[in-house]
Amino acid sequence: MIELVKAKLADIPAMQELVASEVKEGIILDRSEDEVATNIRSYVLAKVNGRLVGYTALHIHSPRLAEIRSLIVDEDYRGRHIGQKLVQFTLEEAKDLGVKEDVLVLTYLPDFFAKIGFKEINKEGIPEHKIWTDCIKCIHFPVCNEVALVYKI
């Protein structure tokens, strides 16, 4: 059974281990342990029998815009709708927090998010502060192949 729980500081080493190969390949941005700790309240974890099998984060940019970040599911657990459950959890959290308009995602898997109701947008519509705080740290910057999508709240 999949359990969705909010992350705790003690979860950070397992989170870093789970995402390491995706970070190395440039699929997910590298976030230091300190950065994860600073944003620990943003993360939701998927656990099976107490084992971390996936996670994501909901980052709030403004009262109108939030972003789903760092979605990862252990390769052995893919295809079990864990990613979808994590995304649905964050969308509900965005609504509960009062995000007024959109939840953004930048991804190499646009079809996954489209099935959940996200719509592709032009990357030029992404707030500039997003580009300069996150994208500039990416190994692919400035040549980005990710697709931007939004979910209307």
Image (cartoon, helix red, strand yellow):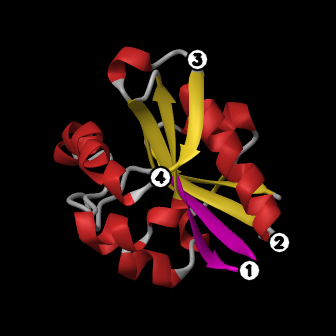
Place residue 61 in its image quadrant.
bottom right
Residue under label 3: 1
- Residue 111: in sight, yes or no? no
101 in relation to 7, above or below = below
Other-residue count near label 2 (Cα within 10 Å), few / some / many at <14 / 14–19 / ≥20 = some
Task: Tell me residue 63's x, y (percent).
Answer: 74, 80
- Give the percent coordinates (x, y) of residue 51: 38, 28
Nearer-N-terminus badge (1/4): 4
Question: Real-space Cα distance between discs 1 and 2?
Answer: 6 Å
In this rendering, position of residue 136 left or right of residue 99: left
Q: Which residue is mark 2?
A: 100
Task: Name the residue carrying label 4.
Answer: 7
Q: Amino acid under label 1?
A: Pro
**Mark 1 lies on residue:** 63
Residue shown at the point (59%, 37%) measured from the top left = 4
Within 10 Å of the Cα at label 4, are there few (<14), some (14-19), or many (20+) other Cα atoms?
A: many
Which numbered mark, 4 or 2, is in the foreground of this view? 4
The answer to whether the residues at label 1 and label 2 have Cβ atoms under 8 Å apart is yes
Q: Which type of secondary structure does the marked residue at label 4 adopt? A: loop
Mark 4 or 2 closer to N-term?
Answer: 4
Residue 14, position as x, y percentages in the image? 28, 42
Residue at 68% across / 60% down in the picture? 103
Badge 3 element: loop
| Front position in the image: 7 or 117 | 7
Q: Nearer the viewer, residue 63 or 4?
A: 4
Report the magenta residues as a range.
57-68
Query: What's the residue type where badge 4 is placed?
Result: Ala
